[in-house]
């Protein structure tokens, strides 16, 4: 096998910190390129009939899930979206206050149009938790997996016990098998809502809010865990979502792989001497440990190790798309992106420390495995051949090696 002496043969190996910064720059370049390629690939994939069908099917299942919850009255659909627990709780307190004030003779025209703009009078059909415990659990008892449990009860007394468990019973009064706020409690809350600094009303409001919110949250937890129709729909939706996420994960991996191939396999051949974008910009090159130019297998080993090392780029893309939950995406059926990122971090730390084992070459684990050394082309290199001792400029070396400034 013919070997060619590297133009960086007489150059000094670069120090660990500089190498780290150069690799960090290459990491950033690969990240930007990966995001760009992913964006193009995903835009194309989204137009395929298969992906469109999957996405429409997932949207339909999501709507069915919302409708299931809406039927239970644990939340309400507004413009195709379920209200949050906070919104449901605030609506309840606003409506309960409004109902009590009106029932006790208050003139609707005298009440705040801003605070009670969408307020309605509460009864057994439009109070979310009342309907769930008195009607929904009764009618659908057999649909709950835990319906045979002693804890599974329903009816007005069940609702009353839960709602008053952590609040003062003096805040409520029972009329026609429904719990209404007392007039005094409603007036105190109304004063707090109007001024924002009425202490008695604030105390009552916060106590009722916390208790209703807590009961609503626990009721939803029970519903999603034990209500069979919801569980069946959710399982189907979850499987469909997983398949869509798998498509996206494959797109991320392919985009990442293409970017690493371009930066660490194609560019080193174009720029010569194993130069990546960052290495070329800072006049840094790669040569073999015997001071010859790197061969294909040397560069391929460097590429392969880098492919494994830079994998947090996939995690970053996943976070950009799905937030921190993107780290839970599973690679090859068992390994999460978070685990891969942790592996990469540990490897980089060990590799950085490894450079100090041989201070003559400052090789990382990647350098060591590929039998290469990363060297810095300072402003000049002394050629100590027998014929002459001329000073050779690094940029001249680049031009002799087939690259341009």
Image: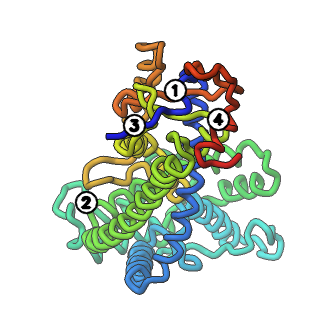
**Is the residue under label 3 in contact with that under label 2 (CB below 8 Å)?**
no
Q: Residue furthest bottom?
A: 49
Which of labels 1 and 4 is toward the front?
1
User: Residue 9's mark?
Assistant: 1
Please give the name of the residue rendered at 39% of the width and 41% of the height, measured from the top-left corner.
295
User: What label does residue 34 carry, if any?
Assistant: none
In the picture of the structure, the residue carrying the numbered disc 2 is 152
Q: For residue 169, say whether it is visible.
A: no
Cβ atoms at labels 4 and 2 below 8 Å apart? no
From the top left corner, tell me how far across and down residue 404 is, in percent: 68, 49
**Mark 3 neighbour class, 10 Å CA radius: few under 14, some 14 to 19, many 20 or more:** few
Is disc 4 placed on a helix, strand or loop?
loop
Q: Residue furthest left?
A: 148
* N-terminal-most mark, 1 or 2: 1
Q: Give the total number of marks visible in the rendering.
A: 4
Q: Residues within 10 Å of mark 1 (few under 14, many from 20)?
A: many
Q: Of label 4 and label 3, which has the lower sequence position?
A: 3
Q: Considering the numbered disc 1 on the image, is that residue within a helix, a strand or a loop?
A: loop
Q: Quadrant of the N terminus?
A: top left
CA distance separating discs 1 and 4: 14 Å
Measured in 3D between alpha carbons, the distance from the residue under mark 4 to the one under mark 2, in whole angstroms, is 73 Å
Q: Nearer the viewer, mark 3 or mark 1?
A: 3
Tags 3 and 1 touching, CB below 8 Å = no
Q: Residues within 10 Å of mark 2 (few under 14, many from 20)?
A: few
Q: Rounded to the nearest whole Å, what is the CA distance between mark 2 and mark 3?
A: 80 Å
Closer to the chain start, of discs 1 and 4, is 1
Residue 3: numbered disc:
3
- Residue 338: percent from left, percent from top: 40, 43
Q: CA distance from mark 1 to mark 2?
A: 80 Å
Mark with earlier residue (3, 1): 3
Image point (67%, 33%), residue name: 394
Q: Which mark is residue 283?
A: 4
């Amino acid at each position: 096998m013919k070997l060619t002496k590297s133009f960086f043969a007489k150059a000094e190996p670069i120090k660990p910190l500089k190498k780290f910064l150069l690799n960090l720059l290459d990491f950033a370049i690969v990240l930007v390129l990966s995001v760009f390629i992913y964006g193009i690939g995903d835009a194309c994939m989204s137009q395929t009939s298969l992906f469109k069908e999957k996405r429409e099917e997932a949207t339909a299942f999501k709507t069915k899930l919302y409708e299931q919850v809406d039927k239970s009255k644990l939340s309400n659909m507004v413009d195709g979206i379920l209200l949050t627990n906070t919104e449901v709780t605030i609506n309840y307190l606003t409506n309960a206050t409004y109902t009590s004030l009106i029932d006790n003779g208050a003139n609707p025209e005298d009440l705040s149009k801003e605070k009670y703009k969408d307020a309605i009078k509460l009864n057994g059909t439009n109070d979310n938790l009342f309907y769930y415990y008195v009607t929904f659990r009764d009618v659908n008892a057999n649909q709950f997996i835990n319906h045979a449990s002693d804890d599974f009860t329903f009816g007005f007394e069940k609702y009353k016990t839960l709602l008053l468990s952590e609040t003062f019973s003096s805040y409520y009064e029972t009329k026609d098998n429904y719990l209404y706020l007392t007039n005094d409690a409603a007036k105190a809350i109304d004063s707090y809502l109007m001024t924002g600094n009425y202490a008695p009303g604030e105390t009552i409001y916060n106590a009722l809010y916390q208790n209703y919110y807590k009961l609503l949250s626990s009721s939803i937890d029970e519903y999603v865990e034990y209500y069979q129709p919801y569980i069946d729909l959710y399982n189907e939706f979850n499987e469909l979502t997983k398949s869509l996420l798998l498509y996206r994960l494959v797109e991320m991996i392919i985009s990442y792989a293409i970017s690493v191939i371009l930066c660490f396999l194609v560019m080193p051949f174009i720029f010569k001497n194993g130069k990546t974008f960052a290495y070329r910009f800072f006049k840094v090159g790669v040569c073999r440990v015997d001071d010859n130019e790197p061969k294909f297998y040397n560069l391929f080993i460097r590429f392969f190790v880098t492919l494994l090392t830079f994998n947090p780029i996939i995690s970053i893309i996943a976070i950009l798309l799905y937030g921190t939950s993107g780290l839970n995406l599973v690679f090859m059926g068992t390994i999460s992106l978070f685990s891969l990122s942790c592996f990469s971090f540990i490897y980089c730390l060990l590799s950085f420390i490894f450079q100090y084992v041989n201070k003559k070459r400052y090789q990382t684990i990647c350098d060591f495995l590929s039998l290469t050394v990363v060297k810095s082309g300072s402003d000049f290199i002394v050629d100590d051949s027998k014929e002459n001792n001329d000073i050779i400029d690094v940029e001249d070396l680049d031009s002799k090696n087939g690259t341009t400034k």
